[in-house]
Amino acid sequence: MKIGLISAYDYSHPGGVINHVSYLGHYLQQMGYEVKIVAPVRRKGTRYFGEDVTPVGRPLPIPYGGTTARIPLSPWLPYQVNRVLDRENFDIIHLHEPFIPMLCLSTLTQSKTINVGTFHACHDRSLMYWLGQPIMHRLGKKLHGKIAVSQPALKYISRYLPGEYRIIPNGVDTRHYRPEGPHLPEFKDGKINILFVGRLEERKGVDDLIHACSLVKKEFNNFRLIIAGPGLKLRYKYELLARRLLPDQVIFTRFVPFEQLPRYYRTADIFCAPATGGESFGIVLLEAMASGTPVVATSIPGYASVITHGQDGLLARPKDRRGIADALLTLINDKILRNKFIENGLITAEKYSWENVSRQVADYYKTLINTYSGKI
């Protein structure tokens, strides 16, 4: 089986979809399938596992859904896509965000084989999808299989493209993220380490976390907040807020390389994800749990689909700074509960291992090939 994995977004800019595509390609190759990734690539030669990548289009940063989508916009792109499809002759084309312009949309339009679409996003609404429903309904007929990464993602896309979907979640690399391994010795000084990992965007809730930690400080002072993630636009604002509310207690690390992230998770006593919305899944929650770190998160649908409150983590209402502070204080003061969440979190994370997820995807491919082979 020859599989084409098509990414709508810049392959050289790590993020949720890119991580998913690269890991899926890697594990499908390990299962013996021939896999080629087709994606816009800003930095030529970008590889994560030595995978076979065909660059198509130069991505541009476009504001979208509270973040920045790096997608190619070029009148020549349909021609480039046509050349790739003719040359590769895929048995399965798997498009990640099929209706994001232009690469996935051009591929779906021109594809003459079995097409699968995975929908990763979850927002309150989408003007682009609302305006594009006629195109989505027409081209949606060319999607022989549809995957949503979670129930919230399914609910979101179903508003604009009703139909039958299979839920196959994101995966976590349980070989990379594991409790055993090195820590960050400079932060192992007896203080409770509270960790945030993510881009510095408003929807990630960093301001709520800083305010929540200022409430924690009134009852417990011996902690450190580590904020690990890229983002320049809001960094100065958050640094000023931290200096005012938590002087000498907040560390901004900027971008942390993939190889170093497990050290941060293992060093943390508590991981906190205070996002306000726009998350279809909770991959950072799984990374923390796989690393043996107890989790506090907000009860947005994407996170609540991963965390079971009181079993493998604590959930607080989004934007509820007092609630987030209380959850943090609960774990700070209860080491037995932290250990319970560590134990149960490891079990939860293993269910989402890439071995399990890639097997589900491969089984779905086989089902579609058995159903549609010779009918297209």
Image: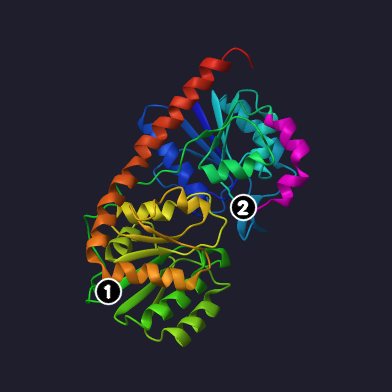
Q: Position of residue 166 (x, y in %)?
A: 52, 32
Which amino acid type corresponds to the residue marked 2 in the rendered image? His
The residue carrying mark 2 is 123
Query: Could you tell me which residue is drawn at 47 percent across and 53 percent down?
Result: 303
The residue carrying mark 1 is 187
Colour logic? rainbow
**Left of 25 or right of it: where is 129?**
right
Query: Could you tell me which residue is drawn at 42 percent across and 55 percent down?
Result: 284
**What segment is highlighted magenta in the picture?**
123-140
Q: Position of residue 282 (x, y in %)?
A: 45, 52
Question: Magenta stretch mostly in which secondary structure?
Answer: helix
Query: Could you tell me which residue is drawn at 47 percent across and 87 percent down?
Result: 244
Residue 92 sits in quarter: top right
CA–CA distance in space, label 1 to label 2:
36 Å
**Mark 1 against mark 2, which lies toward the viewer?**
2
Tag 2: Cα neighbours inside 10 Å, few (<14), some, or many (≥20)? some
Q: Secondary structure at mark 2?
A: loop
Residue toward you, 279 or 183: 279
Query: Could you tell me which residue is drawn at 72 percent across and 36 percent down?
Result: 136
